[in-house]
Image: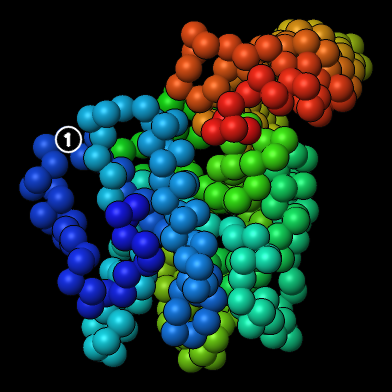
Amino acid sequence: LRKHSAILRSDDPRLDFVTYSELEIQVQDRQNSVIIFVSHRWLSPREPDSKCNIKHRLICEGIEHIQEIINDSDTEYFVWIDFSCVDQIDLELRNQGINSLPAYIERADLLLSPIPADSSLPAGAQRINYKGCKRLSIRDFGSSITPRNKIELAKYIHTSDIFSRAWIRLEQLIGSNTPVHPTCFNYFKRLNLHRTDRPHFFVTPDRKHSFHHLIMLPKLTKGIQELLDPLKGVTTDKRDMEIIQVIKNKLDLNEDNEERYSGDRNERGEMHGNGILYYENGAEYKGQFVANMKHGKGVLYYATGDRYEGDFVADQRCGVGKYFYTNRALFVGNYKDNKRDGKGLYFPPGRPNDPIEIFCIMGEVTEKSLQNIPASEQ
């Protein structure tokens, strides 16, 4: 993909296609081959990208980051993107490709969405008719997305636009509700993370004050699935809604976990002692409680797949802890009021023996510390 300067159209002779049946024959171990489904919003009815091909660049960078995270030279990578993989010339073949969308995503191992900076988009790409559609904000995802990632994604108009497109909502819904086949590559299982669904990454151009510009979306809860109802989204062609409704009706939507607790209680019936708290959004806490609050030593598994191990005080991360990111990065250091605070060690993705000393003030890495971090890791 990188050797081409743009997203190629389906009839371009430079494309190197492989069918899924050929892939199964060629690849002896499907668990060592990764299929990446690119879920994106076209910037115009005829062209998916800008003239400067910003989305192509972001897609390439996102895939390269994923390769760094998986960190296995024996793993092969394949990319599915509609402009290249769905026939753009023959209308009948194009419709067949669209109707096969669930099958494509079912065979994919992860989803990737490029989020270009607003300044790089053509003016017309920012104008969407939101009549009858609630324009969603990244903040609508609630606590499932970390504050740092919310701040980064909220900067881009394209973030709200991509969440408002009916086709992208449908792709997110399919990806989150279609189980990963046991014989296929499983991202979370490979990295020993606490999720079982199919990951969906956003890749942004902004690296400032961010160790990685690859952001993983949380598992879609029932509430978020209702917000992202494809039938309430925006389409360029109103006739698409009929196809979207047919595909959505065939999906078996996951139900939310109920919040529940298993463990010790005090005489007032409060969570007190050792126990496990299962959250509605799929997060989970294992550890010590005092009067219904996380207090003492514990492990918090986030809905994103991140994990924190360490000290808690009155429901807040406070004391010494380790934060394991889904990109295989690691932070070890002090926490105060739920934020990194003071000295700590940052281990970049795939480099467990090469820590970088940093200093944080209420969650923010100081400018002086950023100088110690290579630009490729910021």
What percent of the width, then of the height, locates residue 368?
Answer: 78, 22
Residue 296 relative to residue 41: left or right: right
Residue tagged 1: 29
Pick whichever, 315 or 250, lies toward us.
315
Is the residue marked by circle 1 packed among few (<14), some (14-19), or many (20+) residues within 10 Å?
Answer: few
Pick whichever, 110 or 61, lies toward us.
61
Residue at image point 36% right, 46% down = 109
Residue at image point 38% right, 65% down = 6
In the current view of this chain or complex, which residue is farthest to the left? 25
Residue 121 appears in which quarter of the rendering? bottom right
Judge whether residue 180 can be spotted in this image. yes
Residue at image point 13% right, 56% down = 21
Residue 117 appears in which quarter of the rendering? bottom right
Residue at image point 42% right, 32% down = 68
What percent of the width, then of the height, locates residue 340?
Answer: 79, 21
Q: Secondary structure at mark 1?
A: loop
Looking at the picture, does residue 144 appear above or below residue 270? Answer: below
Pick whichever, 105 or 360, lies toward us.
360
Looking at the picture, does residue 326 appear above or below residue 85? Answer: above
What percent of the width, then of the height, locates residue 258?
Answer: 67, 40
Residue 14 relative to residue 313: left or right: left
What kind of residue is marked 1? Asp
Judge whether residue 106 can be spotted in this image. no
Look at the image and tell me in which quarter the C terminus lies: top right
Residue 6 relative to residue 358: left or right: left
What percent of the width, then of the height, locates residue 343?
Answer: 78, 10
Residue 370 appears in which quarter of the rendering? top right
